[in-house]
Image (cartoon, rainbow, N blue to C red):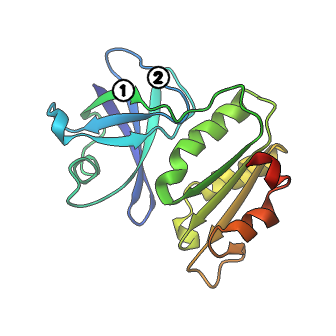
Amino acid sequence: KVELIGKEKIADNLCVFRFKYKDKKISHLPGQFFMVGCTENTIERRSYSVATAYNDEDFELCMKILESGVVSGRLVNLKEGSEVYIDGPYGKFYLKEGDGDIVFIAGGTGVTPFRSMIKYIIDKKLDKQITLIYSCRTEKDILFDKEFTKLSQENKNFKFIPTTTRDKNYKGCKGRINEQFLKENIKNIKEGM
């Protein structure tokens, strides 16, 4: 079990939830996920990627809120201090420290595991060049925009390239991520594929 210690609405239907370990501390690797539920019933659990790099005391999950959602629909209405059930961590999609330079390509809430990996690389001062190409419909849908922008300004080894597909007024990159977009934004693309 974990305790809900905070929640923050970051977009129209998206929320970041912060949890604190109650009984025992569970370590996770950047990119892994937990199975989360509001009851002991394991059938009513859903998987959510961890949004934080690592921490012995607490962790964050980012969720799209669905009113009829078995987990998200209930979590959004819980009060701080409520107990939530988790299993895990699970998943083999995690950062391996020996990997070379990295290009992450994400859309929507799919950016969550990359956030934990990017924060880990920067916190540990690993010698890696990181590029995050992140596509959303509109500027208001870009999750963690201010955080990623700040990280890219403060860390020469991190490049953040957001793009929107349905926002005519957006001042940054526009359009879908395709081969041409990748060639224009990634040095030595052929070496990385």
Q: Classify the position of the N terminus by image quarter.
A: top left
Q: Is residue 105 above or below residue 183?
A: above
Is residue 45 shown left or right of residue 135? left
Is residue 62 shown left or right of residue 69? right
Between residue 34 and residue 21, name the one nearer to us: 34
Q: Residues within 10 Å of mark 2 (few under 14, many from 20)?
A: few
Question: In the rendering, at what x and y percent does residue 154 appear?
Answer: 80, 45
Between residue 6 and residue 173, name the one nearer to us: 173
Question: In the rendering, at what x and y percent does residue 166 appear?
Answer: 55, 80
Question: In the rendering, at what x and y percent does residue 67 appear?
Answer: 23, 61
Q: Amino acid at mark 2?
A: Glu
Residue named by callout 2: 57
Q: Dots 2 and 1: beta carbons under 8 Å? A: no
**Residue at 24 percent of width and 45 percent of height:** 78
Residue named by callout 1: 88
**Residue at 46 percent of width and 32 percent of height:** 59
Is residue 40 shown left or right of residue 176? left
**Residue at 73 percent of width and 47 percent of height:** 151
Q: Is residue 125 above or below residue 102?
A: above
**Residue at 85 percent of width and 52 percent of height:** 188
Question: In the rendering, at what x and y percent does residue 134 appear?
Answer: 62, 60
Q: Amino acid at mark 1?
A: Gly
Callout 1 secondary element: strand
Between residue 4 and residue 111, name the one nearer to us: 111
Query: Which image quadrant for residue 60?
Result: top left
Residue at the far bottom: name it: 168
Q: What is the distance, in whole Å, between disc 2 and disc 1 at their CAs?
A: 16 Å
